[in-house]
Amino acid sequence: MKKLIIGNWKMNLGLKASLVLAKAVKGIKTNNEVGVCPSAFALAGVKQILSGSQVKLGAQNCFWEIAGAFTGEISAKSLKEIGCAFVILGHSEQRALGETCQRVNLKTKAVLAAGLTPVVCVGEDWAKYKSGKSRAFVQGQIKRALTGIKLNGKKLVIAYEPIWAIGSGKAMRAGEANQMQALIKAEAKKVLGQPKAEVLVLYGGSVEAKNAADFLRQDNIDGLLIGGASLKAQEFKKIANIK
Ligand code: 13P
């Protein structure tokens, strides 16, 4: 089945390096859906390079207002104008800097209103995982992020990224991720009040070419959100091409 594979370049690349990587991945041809999320300053340049490519463009964050006196912020409407297809929201690295569920909720609404697909990140830290509180914690994150949201036929993507698995080289076991993702999908549909809503759930956290297929084989894993491995063009291509 067709999966969604998104590379999150985080703040790893400057403008030149972003354009070089965009050139290296633009030729990806696969049955999966693929996207990359460069830093905001590189979005327009990367979009130009990706013109005619199957690889879609995404942003790593945005603000919830459409326009106005909000120094340093970027609206979902502007991201749409640049040519983004989706926006990562509530990444744990943003949450660690103060991002709240309430703001993720406002941003999710703004992204949907702009005609883009939100990629809402959730996930527990090691202490919660070890003490068996992952499920309740992640359900709470979903409830707060999705309260009052109506999809009206639009697509929502949730990325389940256990914080302890991010950049640690210790991915969650695929079967365990699969179980969490079934729960996440059910919770999201419950909060949305739409059993038939189009909700995709991605896994993220130390995914590489060598373990990606294990995740993609799982029923409830609709795709992957990839950090470190998405910075290596060949590695990312391999993952994008997994059937
Ligand atoms: P890594 O793939 O580097 O673990 O990062 C995952 C992530 O945070 C993607 O958003």
Image (cartoon, grey):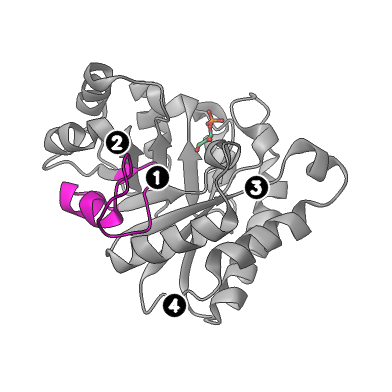
Of pointers 2 and 1, the one earlier in the residue sequence: 2
Residue picked out by circle 4: 150
Label number found at residue 61: 1
Mark 3 highlights which residue? 123
Label 3 SS: loop
Dot placed on the residue nearer the N-terminal end, 2 or 4:
2
Please state which of the two labelled residues, at mark 3 or mark 1, is closer to the viewer: 1
Is 232 situated above or below 57?
A: above
Work out whether residue 1 can be spotted: no
Within 10 angstroms of label 1, few (less than 14), some, or many (20 or more) residues? many
Q: Is residue 68 magenta?
A: yes
- Label 2 C-beta lies within 8 Å of the nearest ligand 1 atom: no
Pick whichever of labels 4 and 1 is earlier in the sequence. Answer: 1
Q: CA distance from mark 3 to mark 1?
A: 17 Å
Task: Please name the residue that numbered disc 2 is placed on.
Answer: 40
* Magenta span includes 43: no
Q: Which range is magenta?
A: 58-85
Which residue is at a point 21% across and 24% down the rendered structure image? 19
Viewport quadrant of the C terminus: top left
Q: Is residue 77 left or right of residue 92?
A: left
Residue 15 rendering spot, x and y as whole percentages: 24, 21
Disc 2 versus disc 1: distance between alpha carbons?
8 Å
Q: Is residue 138 left or right of 59 when viewed as pictured?
A: right
Q: Amino acid at mark 4?
A: Lys
Q: Using a 10 Å C-alpha cutoff, classify the residue at mark 2 as few (fewer than 14 neighbours), some (14 to 19) or many (20 or more).
A: some
Compute the Cα span from label 4 to label 1. 21 Å
**Which residue is located at x 69 percent, y 62 percent?**
139
Q: Are marks 3 and 2 in contact (CB under 8 Å)?
A: no
Distance of label 3 from label 2 (alpha carbons): 24 Å
Q: Earlier in the sequence, mark 4 or mark 3?
A: 3
